Image (cartoon, rainbow, N blue to C red):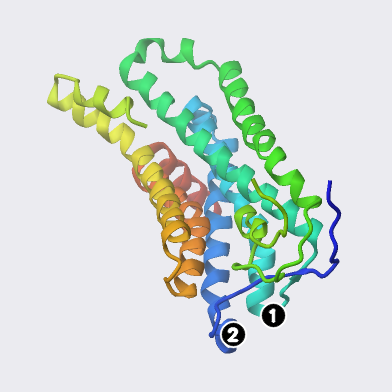
């Protein structure tokens, strides 16, 4: 094992060349972060308090909202620290821990989206057996499995970061720590598709429309998540000559757009959640 030959902290990076207006850039970031916290927090609150939402679909949605909140709270301190306070330094241990949570939560979110697709598959194909297949205990076991998969599978890639020597530049590309970003600084040898065809196989036009409407929220969330993932991957893999601001912007889109859009998508397309939100608002307005 190696031991670090430099105790110098890593340096986070905001928008290169725009440091003079970082305090202005921080305003929309603060608004977006606040919207994410309020939106996902509201979803969790109404699912917890409304007994009619105590169903598998909404349990999975609660896990998704919790994951989005976790991702937001993981990145928000360093992003706002760089933009508002110009606080760029981050210790190695804090950086690696942040990287661990970022990548773990991303894996959890992809697993939750898969579980939600299966939930819609069962609801459409075997509605009479839905409650017997997706019991509360089974849903809890599946959710626990998703969480364990996310938080355990990333341990082995993250642990070596604690022992690698970092003798190159200590400047990171973003205002948060990503595994691939940190690995570049190490001077060591670093070595949904079944549900929707089923829907289209339903013979009745009315039933097909109803089934698609049931899936549209999930389809939207999957597209929001994976389009941003693919976009960020392509930029990192093939965008060597793309301006740095494009890399940074895509990373923020990946981390902020899905948590921002998911509560909006489900609030617009799910009548039960609409009713719960209206009930909540009418209760506070009295």
248 on left or right of 175: left
In the image as oriented, which residue stretches furthest toward the front? 189
The picture places residue 231, in percent across and down from the top left corner, at 40, 56
Q: Residue at x 16, y 26 (%)?
A: 206
The picture places residue 260, in percent across and down from the top left corner, at 48, 56
Q: Residue at x 72, y 59 (%)?
A: 187
Cα distance in 3D space between marks 2 and 1? 9 Å
Q: Nearer the viewer, residue 249 or 84?
A: 249
51 on left or right of 2: left
Q: Are marks 2 and 1 in contact (CB under 8 Å)?
A: yes
Residue 197 occupies quadrant: top left
Q: Badge 2 is on which residue? A: 19
Tag 1 secondary structure: loop
210 on left or right of 35: left
Looking at the image, residue 198 lies above or below residue 20: above
The picture places residue 81, in percent across and down from the top left corner, at 69, 72
Q: Residue at x 70, y 71 (%)?
A: 169
Q: Badge 1 is on which residue? A: 86
């Amino acid at each position: 094992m190696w031991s670090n030959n430099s105790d110098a902290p890593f340096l986070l990076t905001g928008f290169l060349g725009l440091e003079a207006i970082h305090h202005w850039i921080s305003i929309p970031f603060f608004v977006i972060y606040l919207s994410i916290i309020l939106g996902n927090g509201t979803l969790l609150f109404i699912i917890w308090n409304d007994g009619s939402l105590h169903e598998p679909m909404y349990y999975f949605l609660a896990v998704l909202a919790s994951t989005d909140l976790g991702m937001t709270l993981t990145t928000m301190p360093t992003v706002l620290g760089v933009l508002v306070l110009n606080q760029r330094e981050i210790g190695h241990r804090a950086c690696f821990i942040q990287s661990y949570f970022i990548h773990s939560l991303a894996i959890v979110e992809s697993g939750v989206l898969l579980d939600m697709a299966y939930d819609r598959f069962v609801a459409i194909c075997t509605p009479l057996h839905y409650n017997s297949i997706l019991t509360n205990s089974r849903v809890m076991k599946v959710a626990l499995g998703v969480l364990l998969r996310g938080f355990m599978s990333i341990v082995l890639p993250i642990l070596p970061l604690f022992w690698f020597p970092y003798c190159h530049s200590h400047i990171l590309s973003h205002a948060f720590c990503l595994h691939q970003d940190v690995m570049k600084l190490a001077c060591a040898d670093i070595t949904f598709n079944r549900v929707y065809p089923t829907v289209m196989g339903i013979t009745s036009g009315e039933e097909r429309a109803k089934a698609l409407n049931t899936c549209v929220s999930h389809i939207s969330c999957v597209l929001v998540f994976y389009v941003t993932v693919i976009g960020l991957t392509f930029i990192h893999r093939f965008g060597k000559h793309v301006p740095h601001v494009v890399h940074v912007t895509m990373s923020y889109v990946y981390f902020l757009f899905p948590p921002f859009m998911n509560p909006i998508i489900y609030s617009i397309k799910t009548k039960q959640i609409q009713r719960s939100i209206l009930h909540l608002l009418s209760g506070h307005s009295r």
